[in-house]
Amino acid sequence: MAAKLRWPPVLALLLVAGMIGIASAGNIAVYWGQNGGEGTLAEACNSGNYAYVIVSFLSSFGNGQTPVLNLAGHCDPGSGGCTGLTSDIQGCQSQGIKVLLSLGGGGGNYGLSSTDDANSVANYLWDNYLGGSSSSRPLGAAVLDGIDFDIENGNSAHYDDLANALSAFSAQGKKVYLTAAPQCPYPDASLGPALQTGLFDNVWVQFYNNPVCEYTNGDDTNLVKAWGTWTSSVKAGSFYLGLPASTGAAGSGYIPPGELTGTVIPAIQGVGKYGGIMLWSRFYDVQNNYSDQVKGSV
Ligand SMILES: *[C@@H]1O[C@H](CO)[C@@H](O)[C@H](O)[C@H]1NC(C)=O
């Protein structure tokens, strides 16, 4: 008679649907640091909306120069004014949120002149932001979870060396996460060779400011095609759909929340290793209430 104790089909169906929902649920990553009006790092983490917060940017490094952190109106790293962020970072981490440092950005002055130069930048990052030690850590004692590559100046030289050197530090204990934010035209002019190392945990592809591969007026054809190319061409832990969090956050590529969750996410989440979405930036996300509206469906 045990065979009669089957769950009603409808209940079984709901259970299966729920399991599929859980399996495809994605994370949200957000950039924080380039607008003093976006609130604190602690507030960003306490929103409960993000799995990754990417502190941006280390805007100058390489070519033998002393690296420079730029956190816009938040604090002045030059005078040691950002070390108080250590408690925010540790608070984020205690909630399971990974906090990363982003290298590069749209401005700044950066580039790697040789393998030795890449190795010295890696050592600097280890000592000043990761598990090493230095008397002048810009963000204080907190040990960041990893390094993000947001290289945008078209000079791709030696970032593969930098990825290799940073990755090697994982052997010393705590894993050093490596992430990257290429533009959606494949391959990326700045990060192509670095991504070929296959060492990156998360790749958040910027699907904005590039009409050739972004969402345009309700049409996701180019975006879905580029998503397929990225996820099948690059070896990485997972891929994130990088988006502007409001119309003001980028020149083009904004996807209204309903269109993102209703059309675009369903079209890509089964293709390649989908991890979720990345937002530029916390400032625009607060302005537009974007992650609040989409977090249940990405
Ligand atoms: C933000 O979005 C959430 C989810 O849709 C909603 O509950 C909340 O009221 C919104 N907040 C504002 C300030 O619009």
Image: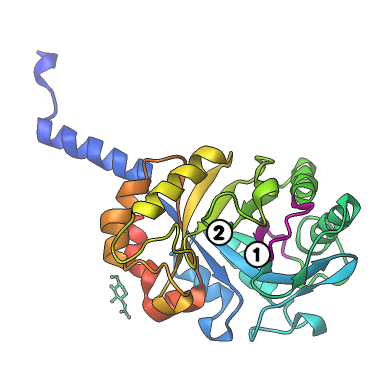
- Disc assigned to residue 183: 2
Residue drawn at point x = 80 percent, y = 44 percent: 172
- Secondary structure type for disc 2: loop
Residue drawn at point x = 66 percent, y = 64 percent: 102
- The residue closer to the viewer here, 217 or 102, is 217
Residue drawn at point x = 41 percent, y = 51 percent: 26
- For the record, the magenta segment spans 142-159
Q: Looking at the image, is 151 positioned above or below residue 67?
A: above
Mark 2 within 8 Å of ligand 1, using the beta carbon: no
Q: Residues within 10 Å of mark 1 (few under 14, many from 20)?
A: many
Overall secondary structure of the magenta section: loop
Mark 1 or mark 2, earlier in chain:
1
Q: Looking at the image, is 2 positioned above or below residue 35?
A: above
**Quadrant assignment for the C terminus:** bottom left
- Secondary structure type for disc 1: loop
Distance, label 1 to label 2, CA atoms, is 8 Å
Q: Position of residue 134 (x, y in %)?
A: 87, 65
What amino acid is at disc 2? Gln
Instruction: Determine which residue is flagged by label 1.
Output: 152
Do the CB atoms of the residues marked 1 and 2 lie less than 8 Å apart? yes
Ligand 1 falls in quadrant: bottom left
Mark 1 within 8 Å of ligand 1, using the beta carbon: no
| Residue 69 seen in the figure | yes
Which quadrant of the view contains residue 228?
top left
Q: Looking at the image, is 152 positioned above or below residue 194?
A: below
